[in-house]
Image (cartoon, rainbow, N blue to C red):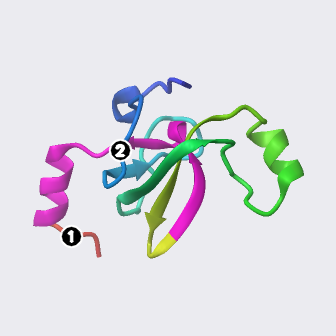
């Protein structure tokens, strides 16, 4: 697992039905700004899919190593093959804050 400088959002496994953050692609370990949490809908072993329709680009950027990946529900769309390293923990405090002050 890649450890980012701000690893407070990184955890070693998620479960189906869990709400999580998508982490910023700059490898800072911070959550992606201006985004709602996403829902884990499936968990399995496979090759992460940064480029769903471009195998060559995906192999170059992500590699070909199988690992734990997830399908997530993000803004009403199911995103397939999301690497565990691209997701972060949604704390109980963050859930309470979201319920109290929904993202507009």
Q: Is residue 39 above or below residue 60?
A: below
Judge from the rendering whether residue 103 lies leftward or rightward of residue 3; answer left or right.
left
Q: Measured from the top left, where is residue 94 in percent x and y?
A: 20, 50
Instruction: Tell me which segment is drawn in magenta.
Output: 78-100
Q: Tag 2's secondary structure? A: loop
Residue hosting label 1: 102
Q: Is residue 63 left or right of residue 12?
A: right
**What residue did someone put label 2 on?**
15
Q: Nearer the viewer, mark 2 or mark 1?
A: 2
Residue 85 belongs to magenta span = yes
Residue 45 is inside the magenta segment: no
Relative to 37, residue 12 above or below: above
**Foreground: 9 or 59?**
59
Q: How far across and down, in percent of the image, does residue 45 sit?
A: 59, 39
Residue 69 sits in quarter: top right
Pinpoint residue 23: horizontal percent, then vertical percent: 48, 45
Q: Residue at position x 36%, y 63% from top? A: 36
Find residue 66 and name its label: none
Q: Could you say whether the residue bearing mark 1 is in a helix, strand or loop?
A: loop
């Amino acid at each position: 697992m890649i450890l980012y400088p701000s690893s407070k959002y990184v955890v070693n496994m998620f479960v189906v039905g869990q709400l999580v953050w998508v982490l910023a692609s700059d490898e800072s370990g911070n959550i992606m700004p201006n985004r709602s949490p996403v829902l884990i809908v499936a968990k399995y072993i496979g090759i992460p899919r940064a480029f769903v329709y471009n195998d060559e680009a995906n192999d170059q950027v992500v590699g070909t190593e199988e690992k734990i990946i997830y399908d997530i529900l993000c803004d009403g769309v199911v995103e397939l093959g999301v690497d565990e390293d691209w997701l972060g923990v949604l704390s109980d405090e963050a859930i309470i804050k979201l319920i109290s002050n929904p993202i507009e």
